[in-house]
Amino acid sequence: MKAFNVSGACRPDRHYMVDLKERLGEVRKMVDAGQYFAITRARQYGKKGDSSGRGAWTKSGFQEALKMLLSEKNALYESLVNKLEDYPELKTVLYDLLFTGRPIPYTAMNKSIEVATMFGFVKNADGTAVVSNRIFESVLYSLFLSEEYVDNRIYDAGLREKNQFFVKGRLNFRRVLEKFVESFDSLYGDRNETFLEDAGRRYFMLFLKPIINGVGNSYVEAQTRNQERMDLVVDYRGEQFVVELKIWRGNAYNERGEAQISDYLEYFHLKKGYMLSFNFNKHKEIGVKDIVLGDKLIVEAVV
């Protein structure tokens, strides 16, 4: 059985191979036309191109490249999908890891973990199974969410209302939260706590997908993903929006969450951030409000 090789030279008899001859011809044409970036050192990240027109990678250029990479159909992605179909238990493990944040111990004797590792989908990170890289994570998120598009009402709500979220081409993320709160409460407000824990964060990603689809993209910060919270970073036309999706665990925990996202905004050099709390308290106050923390503004939504 062939496997993905991530650690050394590839052998056609043992590893999946990709025929690059046609693509290399396209790359050569782009190079001859000067349509490429030159990466010379890490400190050039984010700078504008030099006078020759061959600049370093910029933040927006990297985001565009990532979007193009995720939108293409290739043998690697097709093989990934096929393996999920062949090994249902593998799909369950990856689904739980991505959407619920439940830590999965890395146990080599576990068949699902063994299969996922063999195909290069997961790796051992300090005794915990994690997805191997952000590209695979993004592909898996898109795949799992796409399986719910057809008959999911929260996805339909985002698709139906998408035009109201833009002002002169810019994404009004506060309005996105306001409409999500309204739609989620209308559709699922009477559901129990177990439903909200398992589905709440996934449903926000479903709501957001048709709004930014084709122009923007989003990814989850794996370092902050757990059963209590996860941070979603949204890129849209050169702007970044950081939103913390979390389960309400009382006022003290909520205040810690506000401090955490404030620190996270500092990392991204942003002054405004967003929080979406799924609250099980029957006396909760549903809606969107502003919270000022030092020089940061947090827009908090509660459902």
Image (tube, rainbow, N blue to C red):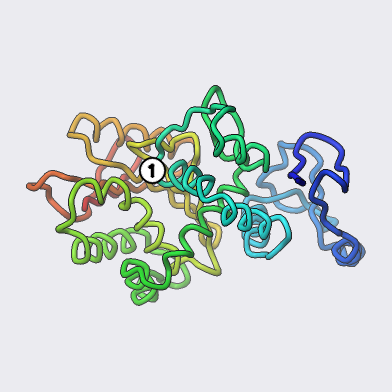
Figure check: 212 above or below 46: below
Can you say whether 174 is above or below 99 in the image? below
Viewer-proximal residue, 259 or 161? 161
What's the residue type where badge 1 is placed?
Thr
Q: Position of residue 248 (x, y in %)?
A: 23, 40
**Residue placed at 87% from the left, 38% from the top?**
9
Q: Which residue is mark 1?
A: 100
Q: Residue at x 30, y 52 (%)?
A: 200
> Residue visible at 88% across and 48% down?
12
Using residue 182 as the reference point, say whether residue 82 is left or right of it: right
Q: Nearer the viewer, residue 69 or 16?
A: 16
Left or right of 11? Residue 237 is left
Q: Residues within 10 Å of mark 1 (few under 14, many from 20)?
A: many
Q: In this image, 252 relative to 269: left or right?
A: left
> Does dot 1 land on a helix, a strand or a loop?
loop
| x, y percent for residue 34 | 86, 62
| Along the viewing direction, whichever of 131 and 173 lies nearer the viewer | 131
- Along the horizontal axis of the image, is 112 left or right of 193? right
Q: Which residue ends up furthest to the top in the rendered image?
A: 126
Place of residue 164 in the rendered image (x, y in percent of width and height, measured from the top left)? 35, 74
Residue 101, located in which quarter of the rendered image? Answer: top left
Q: Where is residue 141 shown, x and y percent of the image?
A: 51, 54
